[in-house]
C-alpha cells in the first residue's frame, strides 16, 4: 500500500518530524482561499498528490507567490493528467492537490529507510545530494549514497544517527534534531510494517532547521491484518474491478490483453498467463479463484472477467486437486448460465474425476470449447480472438512445447 505525500507527512508530524505548514489538500479550486489561509502567508507550493515521485520535473510541484498565481496553478493542476518518470508512460489523474507553505532551502538531503532483502534487515539510505535528481546520482555516483544497516527491532542507534549526521554535513547545532529525526523515521518504518519510508528532500533551511519537504511511505500488504489504521485507508492503487474481486476473496489483477483467464492457484495462474503469451496472445488479467473455489466464487470470477470490456475470450484452466473436476465443471456450467456469455469460452480441466468433468461439459449443450492440455487451451483461446490467422497470433518457431508430455504440464 502506498500513501500519498500528505498522508505520509501527517504521520511524520505525529512522530515529531518537522514538516512545512500545511493548508491541507484541495479537490476543487473553490477550496483554495481557505487552504492558503491555513498554510499561513505566501509564497505557497502546490503539489499534485499522485502515487508516484518525479512530480517536480513533470509540472506537479509549483510555487505561487500570490493568491492569484495560486489560483491559476490550482486550476491547471486539479484534474490534470500527469506522466512522470516513475509512472511508466501511464498518465495519472490528479484528484488532490496539497497546499504547503513554501520553505527557504539551503540544502536538500536524501534519506530513506528501506528493506534490504539480502541483508535481511532494514537499511537507512542517505545522500548529502538529495532533491529531484537522486536517481541520476545513484547511477553516476553510487559512492555518494550512504547505507546504514539497522536492527529490525531497535531501529537506528544514536551512534549510527550521529555518524550519518557527520557524513551528511548536518550543522553541529542541529545534531540533536537530526538524531531525533532519523530515530523517528526508523520507528515509523518498524511501527507501520513499511517497505519504504522516504524523505526527499529533507531540507536544511537558511536558519539551519531541518524540515521534511516531501514524504513517501510504502507499507507491506501482508501486515495489514495488524495495521488497523492503514487497513482503513482508501485503496488508491486498485481498479474498481480489483476492489470488487478483493471483496469476494478472489485474487485479480487487470492487465492489458484480451484473453480473460480464470485459474485456481496463483502458480497455475501465472503459468497460464505465460502459456497464453507463448501462444501469441495477451492475458487480460491474472485471476486466482483460490484452491478451494466454490461455484459462487467461480460465478463471481466470471462476472469480474466479463466486466472488462477488453475481454474477447475466456480461458478457464482449473486443476482439480482437493476439489474434484466434476464439481468444478458443475460450477463452471452454473456460472455460465447465470452470466450472459457473449465471448468464446475455452475450458481445460485436469486432475481428480477429470473424465466425469469433461463429460458434464460435453453433455451440457452450452457453447464452449474443451481443451485437453494447457498448451491446447492457450492455442484455442488465441485462435478465438484472432479467427482469421490460423493458429492465432503465434509466430512460427517461437518454441511451443516439444513433446506431448511437456504440453500436459
Ligand atoms: P517529487 O519528489 O515528486 O519531485 P517533491 O515534493 O520532492 O516532489 O518536490 C520537488 C522539489 O520541489 C523539491 O526538491 C523542492 O526543491 C521543491 N519543493 C517541494 N516542496 C517545497 C516547499 N514546501 N517549499 C519549497 N520548495 C519545495
Ligand atoms: Mg521528492
Image (cartoon, helix red, strand yellow):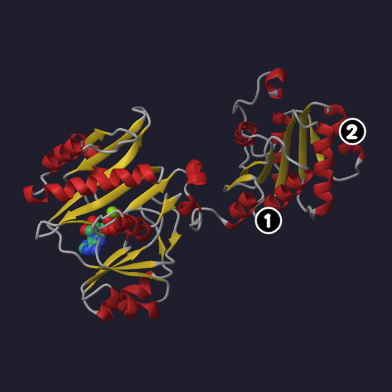
Q: Secondary structure at mark 2?
A: helix
Q: Is mark 1 within 8 Å of ligand 1?
A: no
Q: Badge 2: few (under 14), some or many (20 or more) residues near its Cα, within 10 Å?
A: few
* 133 shown above or below 330: below
Q: Quadrant of residue 340?
A: bottom right
> Percent from the top left, x then y, of residue 57?
29, 57
Q: Which mark is residue 307?
A: 1
Q: Badge 1: few (under 14), some or many (20 or more) residues near its Cα, within 10 Å?
A: few
Q: Quadrant of the C terminus?
A: top right
Q: Residue furthest left?
A: 172
| In-front residue for pair 373/132 | 132
| In-front residue for pair 225/320 | 225
Does 361 sit left or right of 176 as displayed?
right
Does 170 sit left or right of 220 as displayed?
left
Q: Quadrant of residue 244?
A: bottom right
| In-front residue for pair 98/72 | 98
Mark 2 and mark 1 lie on one chain; the one further toward the N terminus is 1
Q: Secondary structure at mark 1?
A: loop
| In-front residue for pair 131/161 | 161
Amino acid at each position: 500500500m502506498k500513501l500519498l505525500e500528505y498522508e505520509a507527512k501527517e504521520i511524520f508530524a505525529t512522530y515529531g518530524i518537522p514538516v512545512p505548514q500545511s493548508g491541507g489538500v484541495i479537490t476543487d479550486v473553490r477550496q483554495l482561499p481557505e487552504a492558503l489561509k491555513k498554510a499561513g502567508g505566501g509564497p505557497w507550493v502546490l503539489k499534485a498528490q499522485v502515487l508516484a515521485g518525479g512530480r517536480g520535473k513533470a509540472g506537479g510541484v509549483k510555487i505561487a507567490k500570490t493568491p492569484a498565481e495560486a489560483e491559476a496553478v490550482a486550476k491547471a493542476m486539479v484534474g490534470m493528467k500527469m506522466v512522470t518518470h516513475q509512472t511508466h508512460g501511464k498518465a495519472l489523474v490528479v484528484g488532490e492537490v496539497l497546499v504547503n507553505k513554501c520553505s527557504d532551502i539551503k540544502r536538500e538531503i536524501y534519506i530513506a529507510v528501506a528493506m534490504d532483502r539480502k541483508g535481511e534487515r532494514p537499511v537507512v539510505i542517505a545522500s548529502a545530494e538529495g532533491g529531484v535528481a537522486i536517481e541520476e546520482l545513484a547511477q553516476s555516483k553510487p559512492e555518494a549514497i550512504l547505507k546504514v544497516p539497522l536492527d529490525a527491532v531497535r531501529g537506528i542507534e544514536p551512534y549510527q544517527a550521529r555518524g550519518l549526521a557527520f557524513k551528511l554535513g548536518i550543522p553541529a547545532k542541529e545534531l540533536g534534531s537530526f538524531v531525533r529525526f532519523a530515530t523517528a523515521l526508523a520507528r515509523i518504518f518498524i511501527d507501520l510494517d513499511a517497505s519504504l519510508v522516504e524523505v526527499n528532500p529533507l531540507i536544511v533551511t537558511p536558519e539551519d532547521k531541518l524540515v521534511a519537504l516531501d514524504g513517501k511511505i510504502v507499507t507491506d500488504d501482508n501486515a495489514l491484518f495488524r495495521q488497523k489504521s492503514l487497513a482503513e485507508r482508501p485503496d488508491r492503487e486498485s481498479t474498481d474491478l480489483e476492489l470488487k474481486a478483493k471483496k469476494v476473496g478472489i485474487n485479480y489483477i487487470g492487465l492489458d490483453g484480451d484473453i480473460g483467464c480464470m485459474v485456481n492457484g496463483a502458480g497455475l495462474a501465472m503459468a497460464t498467463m505465460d502459456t497464453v503469451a507463448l501462444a501469441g496472445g495477451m492475458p487480460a488479467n491474472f485471476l486466482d479463484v483460490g484452491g478451494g473455489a466454490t461455484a459462487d466464487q467461480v460465478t463471481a470470477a466470471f462476472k469480474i472477467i466479463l466486466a472488462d470490456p477488453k475481454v474477447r475470450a475466456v480461458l478457464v484452466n482449473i486443476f482439480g486437486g482437493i476439489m474434484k473436476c466434476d464439481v468444478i465443471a458443475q460450477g463452471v456450467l452454473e456460472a455460465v448460465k447465470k452470466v450472459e456469455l457473449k465471448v468464446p469460452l475455452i475450458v481445460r480441466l485436469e486432475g481428480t474425476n477429470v473424465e466425469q468433468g469433461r463429460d458434464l461439459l460435453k453433455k451440457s449443450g452450452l457453447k464452449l470449447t474443451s481443451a485437453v492440455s494447457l498448451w491446447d487451451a492457450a492455442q484455442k483461446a488465441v485462435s478465438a480472438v484472432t479467427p482469421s490467422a490460423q493458429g492465432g497470433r503465434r509466430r512460427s518457431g517461437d518454441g511451443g512445447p516439444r513433446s506431448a508430455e511437456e504440453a500436459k504440464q
